[in-house]
Image: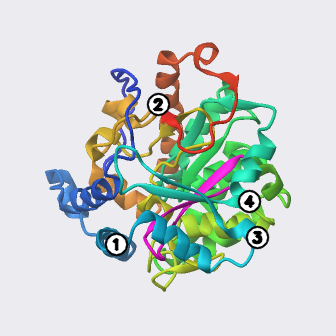
Amino acid sequence: MGPCICSSHAQRLPYAANLNPNSSILRRRAQFISFASNSSPPQDEEATAKKSFAVATGELFLGLATRLIKSRNKGSSSLAEDSGSVGMFENNSEERIGAVVEDEIDPDVVWEQRVKDVEAERNRYSRLVTSPGFSFSAAGLLFPYHLGVAQFLIQNGYIKETTPLAGSSAGAIVCAVIASGASMEEALNATKILAEDCRNRGTAFRLGAVLRDILDKFLPDDVHIRSNGRVRVAVTQLLWRPRGLLVDQFDSKEDLINAVFTSSFIPGYLAPRPATMFRNRLCIDGGLTLFMPPTSAAQTVRVCAFPASRLGLQGIGISPDCNPENVCSPRQLFNWALEPAEDAILDRFFELGYLDASVWAKENPVEVIVQDDSPAFGSSSAT
């Protein structure tokens, strides 16, 4: 096992405002993969520094996918041409793209919504929306960190039934869990079941099947109804220009599970194939283009399971940077993101998420930042 996660009290960092966390995200994600892979472990880690098959596989395919997306973005046609090309494949008007947004600061970050997704948000929040919304990053199997953050935010009134949510990969799963009404402790126990299965029978190539089974058993039959118009799930569509697609209208529980499965699809790692089909589009992991997607609220608080400062990300609200003395090495975090840790470590991640959220909350009192507002369809600013 890797080094223990420190539990000492930590310095508080000021909350960075008005910065765009998605700037150059593809480059940052590639840097993170490279940094985690090449970090020199301290002497006491040398004996345990060997990569498992799952970690090596995950790194390989994440690196290849990131390069593919970057190269295809360079050679892509204009935004208008791409939008029209996508529309050629849509027979149903509700399936057509209703919003195409290119980030004002970083044009590489592009996201879309179908007509039915835009309408779902307007219908749900036609009367009331609570701001800020919360966006949860891609995190792999560090999922318990997000659960701990959500536990604090729900307990202390930051997340209500009218609070918009968004997420990529593991972040999309936690959004579905919150919307379902299940407790975060129940979700942590379900995570341990998944982790035990993977520890006993392997992770790479079969995690997707285990994840589907756990979600099907854990989520209620009406989870899609509870999530419609509230939860934005980010996926990366490959044709024609790789870009993020935000989905928040789900036709059934199975459709929602398909969305979060697609959002989590690390090529060749979650299942033995390079991509997956979602609503007639070839798609992969949403975190590759939308690491922390915007919510439909006027402001969005971003939650990142990795130390944001080490990834070069800015404008992050809640992350291990809130308690920097608790952070273990990037190499170990990356290993745990791809290969499940022991249950005691999963419990500790849950606790750290809760503690980091509490530090952030001291700088952002609920009575000051939480307010009822009109929805802001399109991009939302970081707070």
Q: Circle 1 sits in a helix, a strand or a loop, which is it?
A: loop
> Which residues lie in the magenta part?
230-248
Residue at numbered disc 2: 356
What's under tag 4, amino acid-wise?
A: Lys
Question: Is label 1 or label 2 in front?
Answer: 2
What's under tag 2, amino acid-wise?
A: Asp
**Do the numbered discs 3 and 4 sit on residues whose CB atoms are within 8 Å?**
no
Q: Circle 4 sits in a helix, a strand or a loop, which is it?
A: helix
Question: How would you rate the neighbour count of disc 2 (Cα within 10 Å): few for under 14, some for 14-19, many for 20 or more?
Answer: many
Label at residue 116: 4
What is the spatial separation of the Cα atoms under label 4 and label 1, in whole angstroms?
A: 42 Å
Q: Say which of 370 and 359 sits in front.
A: 370
Residue at numbered disc 1: 52
Q: Earlier in the sequence, mark 1 or mark 3?
A: 1
Q: Earlier in the sequence, mark 3 or mark 2?
A: 3
What's under tag 3, amino acid-wise?
A: Glu
Quadrant of the image occupied by residue 8: top left
Q: Circle 2 sits in a helix, a strand or a loop, which is it?
A: helix
Vertical position of residue 183 compared to residue 363: above or below: below
Question: Is label 3 or label 2 in front?
Answer: 3
Question: Is label 4 or label 2 in front?
Answer: 4
Q: Say which of 235 and 148 sits in front.
A: 235
Question: Is label 1 or label 3 in front?
Answer: 3
